[in-house]
Amino acid sequence: MALPPGPRAPAVVNLARFALWPLQTLHAWRGRYGEAFTVRLTGFGTGVYVANPQAIKELFTGDQSDLHAGEANSFMEPVLGAHSVLVLDGEEHMRQRKLLLAPFGGARVEAARETIREVAEREFASWGVGERVVVRERMRRLTFEVICRVVFGVTERERVERLRERLVAVIDGSPIFMVVGAARKDLGPGSPGRTFKRRLAAADEVLEAEIEARRGEEDLEERTDVLSLLLRARDEQGEGMTTRELRDELFTMLAAGHETTATGLAFAFELLLRNPRVLGRLREELTAKDGDEYLDAVAKETLRLRPVIDGAERTLTAPRTLAGWELPAGTKVYPGIALVHTREDLYGDPHTFRPERFLEDGVESYSWIPFGGGIRRCIGAALAQAEMAEVLRVGIPALELTPVRERPDPVVLRGITLAPKHGVEVRVVRRLAPASRPVAELAA
Ligand code: HEM
């Protein structure tokens, strides 16, 4: 059994190219080696990229017993915890996943839209005319608050701030601690390992305090936030979740859900500002309140052209034939999300930002996969899309913005996400409409 050919450069060179120019590098590798190629990347090991929707469908559907995704994600365990749905496989994964799926269903997400709009109205009301704004940073603040309110059920500003301070300190400092085990070693006061331990303990303290406080709330039975629903949830054996399990899932949802969505939103602003025709049509449709089709298409087209995560990785636990290759057990397979999204045969003129394509053609299954697929498909996909739509619905008609930089922000690897290098810097030119509620009311 041989792996498909791929770049022969040392793993560290491949990683450097991928980190600095992820999209160009993937396209260059596909151009040279075809729909399946093997890449060695320092810190990630050796993996096979597949850019064929049929092969990806086979990977995401059918028998999953010989595929592990949690194993590949296990580098996140020191931060997310051993019970995190992201790092588990097999039955344990399904148990946690089933408990989490219900609170993220359609009805709950619809109910969250009003909260998202409220948070977005307050955010955009605070953008001053003439101000220079780094969109990704502001969107991170916004998506963090949405998770706090929708997932944790925490609305008081002070508690949101405390959670933000402690959790973001762990998340922002964690890539190195996740990948390099030695960096986590506590070598005494002042050592990076000690700092990591201290920050993690501080984050755990506030999370566990929220969980315990909620357990005791009188209105627990009526509450609709995800934490309350999880506290009431029971698995098939009638067992509820332990505090530790809840802590791990809350951390996971925050880590998986806030930066990703904020990055998707930053890309949406970038693409809209660089494509005045699309921006104009979106603004018109939002002002005329003419249905949401175009708005949803803008969010979809953004995630097609700028997928935030490119590695919905699976590890084979038994040999498998995929894309015509007999791959041995132990092989890591990466569905090439960005590569599938830019196939000429699936998307005409694939590098152009044209949301209309989602209204006209209907997209074939496994051609649009920004949220992965199968039994590991993103649990927050509907919430993330609702967030993108509601934030654009509030922000686009309210403000005229202009990009600060002459050229589009390059896409780089940031942690495990593909992100705009400078976070998309814009200047507020003028206010087109007042925020839909009086600013005084929003600031309260
Ligand atoms: C634009 C925003 C987002 C993107 C692009 C995104 C993308 C992804 C991708 C690609 C995966 C891996 C899927 C696979 O392996 O097949 C994933 C998994 C996951 N995502 Fe998201 N995500 C986003 C937002 C969110 C939000 C808002 C939440 C929750 C609040 C969330 C929670 C999760 C969880 C818990 C998993 C693990 C699922 C499992 O292993 O069973 N994500 N996401």
Image (cartoon, helix red, strand yellow):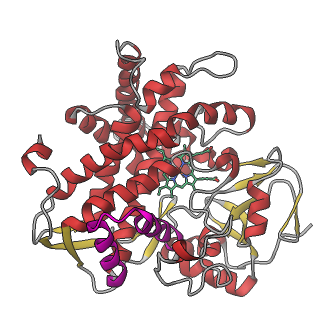
Furthest toward the right, the residue is 1
Residue 67 in magenta?
A: no
In depth, the one of 336 and 5 nearer the eye is 336
Residue 312 to residue 217: above or below: below
Q: Residue 292 is drawn in which quadrant?
A: bottom left
Q: Is residue 126 left or right of residue 191?
A: left
Q: Nearer the viewer, residue 8 or 56?
A: 56
Q: How many numbered marks are there? A: 0
Residue 230 percent location from the top left of the image: 50, 26
Magenta stretch: give its range: 276-305
- Please tell me in which quadrant of the rendered image residue 427 appears: bottom left
Whether residue 233 is situated above or below residue 368 in the rendered picture:
above
Residue 150, percent from left and from top: 38, 38
Residue 333 visible in the picture: yes
Q: Up-down: is 433 above or below 219?
A: below
Q: In the rendered image, is residue 186 in sight? A: no
**Residue 406: x and y, percent?**
28, 86
Quarter holding the N terminus? bottom right
Residue 299 x %, y %: 44, 65
Residue at 41% in and 22% down: 211
- Residue 112 or residue 37, whichever sits in front: 112
Q: Magenta residues: mostly which secondary structure?
A: helix
Residue at 63% in and 75% down: 339
Report the side of 232 relative to 323 (left or right): left
